[in-house]
Amino acid sequence: MPGQLIARGVARHLAALGFACVEEFVPARGLRLDLLALGPKGELWVVECKSCRADFTSDRKWHHYLEWGDRFFWAVDSTFPTELLPAETGLIVADGYWAEILRMPAESRLAGARRTAVTRRFAAHAARRLQALRDPGAALGDS
Amino acid sequence: MPGQLIARGVARHLAALGFACVEEFVPARGLRLDLLALGPKGELWVVECKSCRADFTSDRKWHHYLEWGDRFFWAVDSTFPTELLPAETGLIVADGYWAEILRMPAESRLAGARRTAVTRRFAAHAARRLQALRDPGAALGDS
């Protein structure tokens, strides 16, 4: 299943838990998170969506994603060989319609200054994408 | 000119200044800001759009909007009788395509805790509206 469909199912489930999600969030140059979720208490969860074994084994950057959220999850479909995934990371199984958290990872809380910066960037990212959809005539820089 | 068109022009201009905007933001029960803009340094600007004299004179809540941003502006079209507006407030003249800041109000900076809370709520608002547009099949609570 393509990663974008997995992301859709994950975003639906996290919304039901009170989180708001953005996709393809760029926390720093050269890094792109599949999904960043902001929780009701300001928690930030990073979710990487993997469509298949090769999609996971070819990802050489994932260790860098850890530092942008309080918790880190993989999201995969039900056919994915989950034994590949590091035991200390979170695990979500999803399809295009829904998702379930199978393993909750330990929390590694962001420092306050980084939380503030990431939350602000999340806000700008979501608002700019929203404006681009609501007002296609506006020429907006990407975030 | 309807307030929504004015808001569109204001959002375009503020985007060019590096701000990201959301419309119809609810900072607290019973209050609705026409436009809340988040700046590159985390500034929060409140903009109320008024379509005509009656739209302004019937607004009995606007003093409550001041406490949700660092600066407060009215946005009106070029036919609006701007002498009605308090001199200490900001003034933007807009149409549906663009806007111009005619008077920059003094800054009254939010306390840190409120800035954090409003920024987080801005982020969740924008992300939920964006998700609702990208994934109409998801049933999402409004923020």
Image (spheres, coloured by chain):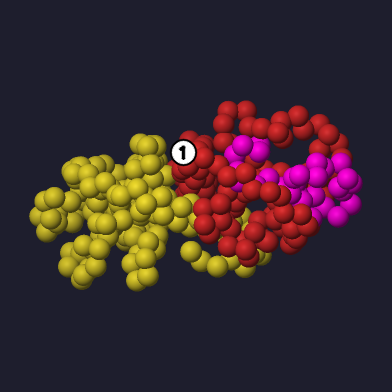
Chain colours: A yellow, B red
Asked if the stretch drawn in magenta spans residue A143, the answer is no
Which residue is depicted at the point 34% across and 71% down? A30
Look at the image and tell me whether residue A131 can be seen. Answer: yes
Q: Quadrant of residue A104?
A: top left
* Secondary element at image label 1: helix
Q: Amino acid at mark 1?
A: Ala
Nearer to me, A68 or A37: A68
Instruction: State left or right for residue A80 relative to residue A19.
Output: left
Q: Is residue A135 above or below residue B53?
A: below
Rate crowding at label 1 as few (under 14), some (14 to 19) or many (20 or more) other CA atoms within 10 Å.
few
Q: Which residues make up the magenta segment?
A: B65-93
Residue B48 in percent (x, y) is at 71, 44
Nearer to me, A80 or A38: A38
Asked if the stretch drawn in magenta spans residue B69, the answer is yes
Instruction: State left or right for residue A101 relative to residue B5.
Output: left
Residue B100 in percent (x, y) is at 75, 60
Which residue is depicted at the point 51% across and 66% down? A142
Q: Which residue is mark 1?
A: B113
Label 1 resides on the chain identified as: B
Which residue is depicted at the point 62% across and 28% down? B30
